[in-house]
Image (spheres, rainbow, N blue to C red):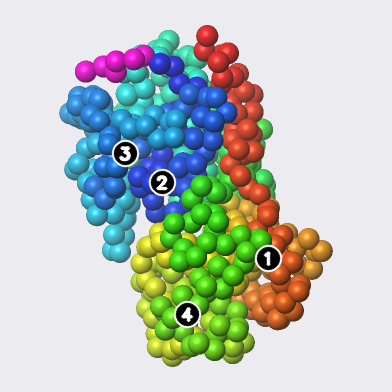
Amino acid sequence: MTPAAIERYDVVFVTSEMYPFSKTGGLADVLGALPPALARLGLRVGVISPMYGRMKAEEFDPRLVSSDCHVGYPWPPITAEIYQAEYYGVTVWFVARDEYFDRRHYYNTYKGDYFDNCERFTFFSRAAVEWLKRLGRVPGIIHANDWQSALVPTWIHYLRRTDPYWRECKTVMTIHNLAFQGRFSSRLFFDSGLPHEAWNMDGCEFWGDFNLLKSGIAFADAISTVSPSYADEILTPEFGCGLEGILNKRSDRLIGIINGADYDVWDPRRDKYLPSSYSTERMTGKMWCKKKLIREYYLSDMLENRPILGFIGRLRRQKGIDMLLDVLPEIMDLGVGLLVLGEGNLDYEARLLEMMEEYQGQLHVIIGYTEELAHRIQAGSDIFLMPSRYEPCGLTQMYALRYGTPPVATAVGGLRDTITAYPHPEATGFTFEKADSRLFFDAVHTAVERWEDREFWNDMVHRAMTRDFCWDRSAEQYQELYRSLGQATPGNFFK
Ligand code: ADP
Ligand code: GLC
């Protein structure tokens, strides 16, 4: 089967997650919002993503468009099924192969990463390239995201040499998190079907291992990351996770573009998950959201008149959850409430649950992943905690701003770029210079004190809620990046 209508796409994203079809974190939110924003600018946009067992794509009714997309990896050649759906002006293709993607989780279980992740995502990336060839007209840009699709720019780089079909195609590699690189045994490189010349320290090789993200950085025509500050930070040994060398070599191709927030999904004026909506003009709804949370999570009624702190995120060192645990008793001594929603490291989960026993009525911990509760904690809290060690962009602090829940965050990466920090007269939140539990506690303390000054606080909440991180602005910057590669002037380039 070949696709009926042969259309030319300005840009096709390749991603391992896309909201609302699949999500473990911010990557999904970005891929659920940026492609539609580019489509609104007039670009013809596609997305290729895996068809996971766990995903709920039924409501979008994906239809089978190919049952025999040949993928020359691993040998003997096997095939993928391709399903297609439309999502806000974007064509989404799902790569299905149940033995790889029909699993309970996407990348790992609590015991660790799936043993065949390299094979799974090499297969996925290769299937994406094969499908784009099957489409019959090459896209202007292929836009890869994180290690799971980082082999795509590598393949295109080599295919351009031998196959005229790919000559006009440019690639972009976006780094959402440099700490996850997809690092595997060298043996898997030699199974991947890539030319052996790619195996060198300016290519796929990293200290004797096969490094997928490094390969994407080495071979893409442009590299982007998700905030200007993080783009600077990753050039240093402190934040470069060992890839600062190749990033410095390619720094003329590196740009930081801040993510946006999807206000169709995250807006307290029309959030379907909230017990009561609210806006800067009518804030009583926020009080109601707070009351409901207090009741539902068995916090003391007295906390209605004290600040409720919220934390939502992966329970990993990146998010500074260990720092929160270190100073938790002192935070509790401030007479505040705290709600924690997250999952991740088993040790952190256990320590949090232990603390919950100790601080009944003041601390509630919810281990798990619940979209609805994430919205409700954003709305029902007064102060949002985000003591990240590093943060490429961070979306939760942007949501917190829109929900009138000023964040307390480390001044790193996207947090630095999106929060105007107290004591600035236009402050929207509180930051502390570096990941250190003492500095974190001091900032929480300041925030709680400032909360007590109602007039000051209301002004700050108002400023936070009216900050605009809409996707359209970021989408324009991506369009500019595509243009700089000589591609994607809608309605012009492909005529
Ligand atoms: P990261 O991608 O590093 O995890 P971001 O701040 O960019 O961090 O995005 C996190 C996204 O995942 C947000 O949409 C947030 O609401 C969501 N999220 C994180 N943990 C949970 C959880 N336990 N339950 C529900 N949503 C969560
Ligand atoms: C990653 C980063 C996060 C960023 C998200 C989307 O998961 O950790 O900071 O917001 O990707 O780009």
Q: Where, by quadrant of the figure, is residue 16 drawn?
A: top left
What range of the chain is rendered magenta?
1-6
Q: Residue at x 50, y 65 (%)?
A: 276
Residue at image mark 2: 19
Quadrant where the image shows the N terminus: top left
Q: In this image, 306 relative to 218: left or right?
A: right
Q: Amino acid at mark 4?
A: Ile
Residue at image mark 4: 294
- Mark 3 vs 1: CB contact within 8 A: no
Question: Mark 1 or mark 2, which is nearer the start of the sequence?
Answer: 2
Residue at image mark 3: 60
Residue at image mark 1: 461
Quick one: SS at disc 2? loop
Pinpoint residue 474: horizontal percent, then vertical percent. Answer: 62, 39
Q: CA distance from mark 3 to mark 4?
A: 36 Å
Question: Mark 3 or mark 2, which is nearer the start of the sequence?
Answer: 2
Q: CA distance from mark 3 to mark 1?
A: 37 Å
Q: Where, by quadrant of the figure, is residue 326 drawn?
A: bottom right
- Mark 2 vs 1: CB contact within 8 A: no
Mark 2 crowd level (few <14, some 14–19, many ≥20, 10 Å Cα) = some
Give the foreground label among 2 and 4: 4
Pinpoint residue 311: horizontal percent, then vertical percent. Answer: 51, 69
